[in-house]
Amino acid sequence: MKNVLVLMPVEARHKEKIEAAGTGCNIVYSSPDQVTEEQVRSANVIFGNPKAAMIGASENLEWLQLESAGTDAYIIPGVLDRKTVLTNATGAYTKAVSEHAFALTLMLQKKLYLYRDEQKKACWSDHGTVGSLSDCTVAVVGLGDIGQAYARLVKAMGAYVIGVKRRATNPPECVDELVMTQDLDTVLPRADVIMSILPNTAATRYIYTPESFDKMKDTALFINCGRGNAVSSEVLYQALSEHKIAAAAMDVAEVEPLPADSPLWGLENLVITPHISGGFHLPETFERIVDIAAGNLAAFLAGRELRNVVDFATGYKK
């Protein structure tokens, strides 16, 4: 009998789904804040994101199903035993994050953030010309499920889409052109919009340097809905305050929460949302996560291949 520890905020209908998939299992429900080290160490299967320090390369843990797409805390050597299978929630956040990034794109193009600021001051003013997606080139840096969903949205509006990804494949229908990550610098001067949806890996940390922003158009828009450490706060502040680019939007920050004394807060040409594009803000997201977990549990017990198995070397799903 397998011990299954569920740390996700499940309701009765979710428990029914998990228990139907895990017939014969001993299923225990808790939360990351209340779970004990003994419960973590005795579990054969965990659903959710326990504190990495509590796992301690548990010899009993056969499989960890994360509720997040990000895996960086769990692929660090010494956290999981190498025999432990790690799966993530890739695919669950696609709609929520891609639509949030799309909304930020239009917000920047149409200067809606400026008008919102003016509204607070009861100021009726005109901020001049705006852009249109039908007339621009959009670079989607990180062409996973979320990146492709965003690409479909902007392409439907008439944009020319350049996809940037780490491995060479046939271009998906949602992009007009595919470029490898190592050639990102060749894309930056061409793009009117750069939307970054990169995970946190050794290869993506601080990938956007001062030189990256020097290569961008001074009319370019930069959007980061991936990981905050793709660009340092200092580099982003410099690019925006010196008007190397026109404007930016960030749902993630190098340090979260963004410190109250960060100069980024005071930039007129920056829109900040507090890492809320994902999470469970769109209720459908959590339903998808439960479906992934329950489906994987049935597959695990039957000895079938699991969905979203993570490669420890890259942090991406295989």
Image (tube, rainbow, N blue to C red):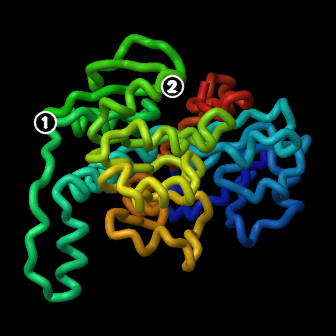
Q: Residue at the location (44% across, 50% down)?
A: 225
Query: Along the horizontal axis of the image, is 26 left or right of 240?
Result: right
Does residue 160 sit above or below 107 in this rendering? Answer: above
> Where does residue 156 sit, x and y in percent of width and height?
16, 34
Name the amino acid, label 2.
Answer: Thr
Residue 298: quadrant of the picture = top right
Residue 52: quadrant of the picture = bottom right
Tell me the residue that label 1 is attached to: 135
Query: Along the horizontal axis of the image, is 136 left or right of 253?
Result: left
Quadrant in which the C terminus is drawn:
top right
Q: Earlier in the sequence, mark 2 or mark 1?
A: 1
> Where does residue 151 sit, x and y in percent of width and height?
30, 34
Tell me the residue that label 2 is attached to: 181
SS assignment at label 1: helix
Classify 10 Å Cα crowding around label 2: few (below 14), some (14-19), many (20 and above): many
Of 116 and 218, the residue lying toward us: 218
Q: Residue at the location (32% across, 26% down)?
A: 162
Classify 10 Å Cα crowding around label 1: few (below 14), some (14-19), many (20 and above): few
Q: Residue at the location (46% across, 33% down)?
A: 142
Name the amino acid, label 1.
Answer: Asp
Does residue 264 sit above or below 246 in this rendering? Answer: below
Of 106 and 36, the residue lying toward us: 106
Residue 38: quadrant of the picture = bottom right
> Where does residue 176 sit, x and y in percent of width and height?
26, 20
Quadrant in which the N terminus is drawn:
top right
Of 52 and 117, the residue lying toward us: 117
